[in-house]
Image: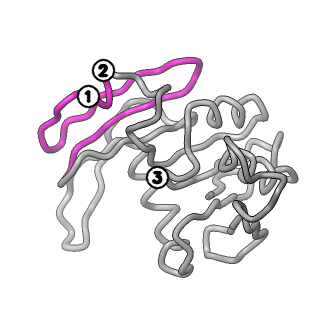
Amino acid sequence: MLTEPDGLILKFRAGSQDIEVARKGHAEKVVMQLMEEHLQNGHSLYMDNYYNSFHLAKRLLENRTYCTGTLRKDLKENPKEVYQKTLKKGENISRFQESVHIGKWKDKRPVMYITTEYEDKKVPVANKRGQISEKPEAIAKYNEFMSGVVDKTSCSHFIHVIEKHYVRI
């Protein structure tokens, strides 16, 4: 599903039932088909870990589209020194390869993330009780832009495109 930041559905695709995308690499094919009208415009795309991969991030960047989101740790192209690193609460480790930033940050539990838009810096973020802590900028932006979509949709996997500045997937 491709949505606006407020949850408005722009495009919907069944995915695994579709013969065009039902094989190896189907998640990447779904993203590219949903985004076909939005590529080459400098949009930002936010995706959950079901869709994200190093290869997809590179492909989107080649099409002038940024992406940010969570990442499954078991993908073979993830840097071992990132996903194998044991972190304490608040710690972050990042690596850059071919303009793709892959990182791991620990809050309550470790979170793997990927971005082609944000650098390796922490930003202050207030929680629900107003307490300030620091998170990697990519995580803070992902939480900011995905929260409206997650709250307003009942689907477990989605893609979000935001006009010019930010796009969610």
Q: Which residue is mark 3?
A: 141
Residue 84: which disc? 1
Extent of the magenta region:
81-107
**Contact, CB < 8 Å: mark 2 with mark 3?**
no
Locate the N terminus by quadrant: bottom right
From what the image shows, is residue 65 above or below residue 108? Answer: above
From the top left corner, tell me how far across and down residue 48 is, in percent. 51, 55
Q: Secondary structure at mark 2?
A: helix
Which badge, 2 or 3, is on the more N-terminal residue? 2
Q: Which amino acid does the dot numbered 3 rest on?
A: Lys
From the top left corner, tell me how far across and down residue 20 is, in percent. 84, 52
Q: For residue 91, what is the image quadrant?
A: top left
How far apart marks 1 and 3 lie (CA) works out to 24 Å
Horizontally, residue 129 falls left or right of residue 15, namely: left
Residue 125: which disc? none
**Contact, CB < 8 Å: mark 1 with mark 2?**
yes
Q: Which residue is mark 2?
A: 81
Q: Secondary structure at mark 1?
A: loop
